[in-house]
Image: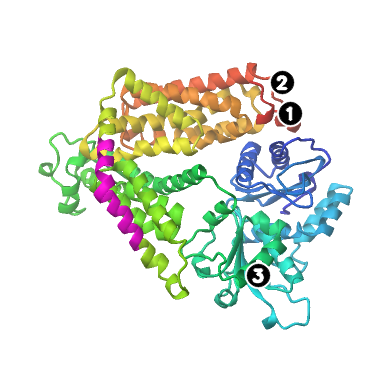
Amino acid sequence: MSIITEDLVSLESISASSPHKVITALAELIATAGRAGHAASLASDAWAREQTSATGMASGIAIPHCKTSAVEQATVAFARLQEPVDFGAPDGPADLIFFIAAPAGASEEHLTILSALASSLIDESFLAELREASDAQEIVALIENSVSPDQPQKTPDETPSATSGEPASARRRLVAVTACPTGIAHTYMAADALKRAAESLNVDLQVETQGSSGAAPLPPEAVQQAEAVIFAADVDVRDKHRFAGKPVVAGRVKRGINEPGTMITQALSAADDPQAERVAAGTSGEETAAEDSGESFGRKTQRVLMTGVSYMIPFVAAGGLLMALGFLLGGYNITDVAGDVVIDNTLWNLPTEADLPDDFVGWGPLGAYLGSVFFAIGDTAMSFLVPALAGYIAYGMADRPGIAPGFIAGAVAEPLMEAGFIGGIIGGLLAGAVASWFRTFEVPRWLAGLMPVVIIPLVATIVAAGLMLMLLGGPIASLTSGLENWLSGMTGAAAVVLGLILGLMMCVDLGGPINKVAYAFAVAGLSGAVAAGEQAPLVIMATVMAAGMVPPLGMALATFVDRRLFSRAEQENGKTAVLLGAAFISEGAIPFAAADPLRVLPSAMLGGMATGALTMAFSVTSYAPHGGVFVFFAIDNFLLFILSVLIGTAVTALSVIALKRWARKTPVAESTADQQSTAPETATV
């Protein structure tokens, strides 16, 4: 199937005033053509990518793009706008829009075609032909010819030839790496732009494209012979240690597209300057790009904390669900004997009644043994929670040299000092700060190789873990213990207030930083609570999970109760949201929130607060950190848990229906133009 067809082309038929509306209209075009199941999901994924970095390019083009599960076939939609729209390009708004949608598991062949199209977009003659084309058929032919395998295409990995008779050995040599978050468009455009500029400057430049369609790494001899390196990247440059000690010019990937000649000239100047910035051992390409863009301290702190939480969650999911299986097979009190059963028994020597608690409620001797095995593995996995959090916070600050110091500082915080979740965060920040500071040191080339694997981890571990042991661990442990005692003592109205706060946090950004903070707070005490028999952390876990289920379930219910308020795509998303909500995946409500945040988010927060308060008031507990209704066996008072979720779901559904009915000027229609009116910019509340 072709990546573009005539029904994926819009010529002067889209009238939009913002990038969001253009993306929404093109997503609808793709869905109408049968290439996407859910236009809202496709638009949401593309808009999320747009917010990481604007996709406007020079010469009046914009390339919104994404990898998404909303499409199964690599697809390009094209629009020539009536009036140009500002997509953030340096030279003004764009009138030619290419919406590129790649399946999450796209084949290398399709990704190569898309990257070839991206490379064509820096060709002024190609753009001129698109502006002069009279119909959709001509547009399709132009785009297909640009990516046709029958045409000789210059791949981004080829090195351009010299423009003079000068031998290659006499030319100055540079290497470059280009990368963007999705690796579909900007990666290859930057590579081609840099190569064309290098050719005009008679510079020998080899480029490594770290994109979706793959690229061979730069030859080691090319890196060794290069005088300097250029990073045009919005994400972490993989295997950056290869360039340690090289003069470096770094910027965002769009700079490689818009200012390739400037970057090459600066790289040549850096090669001649002994004081020029160099690639330090163990640095992160993500940090370089962030620093180049002037990332604020608050934003950087949020980024590294979210890095730690995101890497911690798999430990929580695996460990918590294994513990829940242990409870299912071995009963709630399998914790009392799990260690002894695992050590003293086997599948061929199952435990006897004497080995089990007097009030054993598991599934017989086999259930007791398997339950003990699952619980022991899960409890071990949960013991990595705080070290993993600290280790990957440090990784977010200092790349790989920060991992070991962060893990060690986290392990000192918990379980050694019993400083818990707070201690893990502080230990990770300390380790990352020390490792990040040491990477700024200029060292001889012979020492550069030892920095990331020996010197930085050693020094950062001594400083971070030493401070945790000698100065910070005790006070943080006291603070953590006091907080836990305070939470354990919460009853009545105080517990309800805590439930309101946790419910609000779980629903305010649907899987974003605030949601993750509440979730991490809940799971941090889960393992210790199980071992110590404490009730409060288990109630908090149930509250957080119940509240997180409400937004997708509430939106699904709203689409069933009053379908006419929602587009066809939203009605389809509502069906999917039932399963996502039941499984505790708050992100199932994101397509609704992306299209109408001023109505959806307040409604979700109201429902989440109601559910959080009720779950706390009912003292529902959960031994599992994830899974929603599918881990019913790990939730005490399951019927009250379901009742709390259903009430919050009803509150969300009724709230969003009321807002959509009365807090608007015009009803939702089914047409593309009317759906554009539901964009955030036009909501009247």
Distance between mark 3 and mark 2 Cα atoms: 59 Å
Measuring from the top left, give residue 384's x and y in whole percent.
Answer: 32, 50
Asked if the residue at tag 1 contacts the one at tag 2, i.e. Cβ–Cβ closer than 8 Å, the answer is yes
Q: Residue furthest left?
A: 354
Of labels 2 and 1, earlier in sequence is 2
Asked if the residue at tag 3 contacts the one at tag 1, i.e. Cβ–Cβ closer than 8 Å, the answer is no
Distance between mark 2 and mark 1 Cα atoms: 9 Å
The residue wearing badge 1 is 674
Amino acid at the residue labelled 2: Thr
Distance between mark 1 and mark 3 Cα atoms: 53 Å
Q: Is residue 343 above or below residue 630?
A: below
Kind of element beneath mark 3: helix
The residue wearing badge 3 is 268
Amino acid at the residue labelled 3: Leu
Q: Which residues are magenta?
A: 458-481
In this view of the protein, can residue 376 be seen by the observer? no
Relative depth, front residue between 274 and 115: 274
The residue wearing badge 2 is 666
Measuring from the top left, give residue 466's x and y in whole percent.
Answer: 28, 54
Q: Nearer the viewer, mark 3 or mark 2?
A: 3
Q: Specify the quadrant of the image occupied by residue 676.
A: top right
Q: In which quadrant is the C terminus drawn?
A: top right
User: Residue visible at 59% across and 31% down?
Assistant: 592
Q: In which quadrant is the N terminus drawn?
A: bottom right
